[in-house]
Amino acid sequence: MKADIGLIGLAVMGQNLVLNMNDHGFKVAVFNRTTSVVDEFLAGPAADTEVVGTHSLEELVDSLSSPRIVMLMVKAGEVVDQYIDKLVPLLSAGDIIVDGGNSLFTDTNRRTQALAAQNIYYIGTGVSGGEEGARHGPSIMPGGNPAAWPTVKPIFQAISAHVNNDPCCEWVGDNGAGHYVKMVHNGIEYGDMQLICEAYKLLSDGLGLSADQLHSIFADWNQGVLSSYLIEITAAIFAYKDEDGLPLVDKILDTAGQKGTGKWTGINALDLGIPLTLIGESVFARCLSAQKDERVKAAGVLPKRPATAFTGDQAAMISAIHDALYAAKIISYAQGFRLMREASKEYNLSLNYGEIALMWRGGCIIRSQFLNDIKQAYDANPALENLLLADFFAEAMGKADAGWRKAIILGIEQGIPTPAFSSALAYYDGYRTERLPANLLQAQRDYFGAHTYERTDKPRGEFFHTDWTGHGGKTASTTYTV
């Protein structure tokens, strides 16, 4: 009996997806460039399973039933293209290649179209949930050639996480839609993690709380509106002790790594002219953390942060930091979904935002109770321009506003950086401001560059230029919008 699907790349994610598929009754053939890894996998985690080991791409393809499905779990970029080039001569019309890595969506666009011309179907799918999710049920975001979806759907939906019996996997859209949504997911993940870190810093440095106290606070927060996988694991991290009985978190070097998906999200937001300020600050916060040696030097040169001890109502400030975390989280998702809305229009992706929230409710790193509220907002109004305009979120922002500001003030008074909290608040205040100071900005642009401006007493779309100095002339520059 031939295998239902082949998988290339037996790192942690690949191995766990294979075991997940096997658990759900699918026969999987596997290949790894270092073939000894195949043998070790079969002798170890895959012992006593139906998994088939192969030692060449030819053997892998020959072991598959038709139409053949080959899933790549390899490093994004050139490696994916190299495997595609090697696989195509071995495949037949109607066979399917699936890329389950974090590929850039424009690469998936290109590959989907190029392979369709060769009668090979291509799927670019986001897979989120880390090794635990891959093993027991990830969030899966497939896009690419829709002709391939009916064939892979039974496998993907069976192995994905389920919430209320609904699979956290649905067709996202054509070409690079799946990888685009996964990119934004990862950008939001950057934001969530940075916000939690800023809350941690305010609680530990601002209020002087211990790791054990932080564990209790985050465990409590995980029972309410902040309930999520990231809050849950944060509580567990604070409780974890090193061999000497001291909190392990305090011994971890404060330099954060990143793999690029957050950066891609920020770059795409700039390309589309969408303010994605919180996620952008989260990426830059990681960049700043990586400058450890320079920061240590600066700490010895620049004035120390204020040594003012907090003397106010500690419980009230903890509540304020909670509200800041919740409000800023809403902003992060509002910005992320607004970016997807613009991308859907610009790239013709036809994204379903309620379905995306549904796919993110289970299995993935940003899974949370909060996503149910997003799903309901888009179910009520699929054309919703911004999550902040939904009644539920508008009311939540109103309730959290005062605490949010108090938390940021605590950071300012004590010299504790809160870039994501602060940029989120600036966006919120800007978004709800009917008249921003961009009128002066336009006057400046027209003064030095004759870039023109619109007037409040004239219809939109009419542009004017003023000879501000009396000797600048009447010629205006062309105008454009990013």
Image: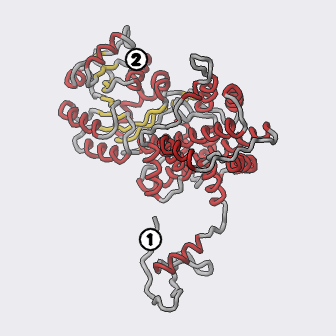
**Mark sitting earlier along the chain (2/1):** 2
**x and y, in percent, of residue 80 in the image:** 29, 36
SS class, disc 2: helix
**Residue lying at 63% horizontally and 56% vertically, measured from the top left:** 426
- Residue in front for this viewpoint, 209 or 124: 209
Q: What amino acid type should be assigned to the residue bearing mark 2?
A: Asn
Farthest-out residue, left: 89
SS class, disc 1: loop
Lateral position of residue 99 relative to residue 117, left or right: right
**x and y, in percent, of residue 352 in the image:** 51, 45
Around disc 1, counting alpha carbons within 10 Å, would you say few (fewer than 14), some (14 to 19), or many (20 or more)?
A: few
Frontmost of labels 2 and 1 is 1
In the picture of the structure, the residue carrying the numbered disc 1 is 480
**Residue lying at 25% horizontally and 45% vertically, measured from the top left:** 114
Figure quadrant of the N terminus: top left
- Residue in front for this viewpoint, 384 or 14: 14
Residue 303 visible here = yes
Residue 330 visible here = no
Q: CA distance from mark 2 to mark 1?
A: 55 Å
Please, is residue 83 above or below residue 43 in the view? Answer: below
Lateral position of residue 261 relative to residue 410, left or right: left
**Residue lying at 69% horizontally and 37% vertically, measured from the top left:** 203
Farthest-out residue, top: 48
Figure quadrant of the C terminus: bottom left
In the picture of the structure, the residue carrying the numbered disc 2 is 22
**Residue 61 lies in what quarter of the image?**
top left
**Residue 210 lies in what quarter of the image?**
top right
Q: What amino acid type should be assigned to the residue bearing mark 1?
A: Tyr
Around disc 2, counting alpha carbons within 10 Å, would you say few (fewer than 14), some (14 to 19), or many (20 or more)?
A: some
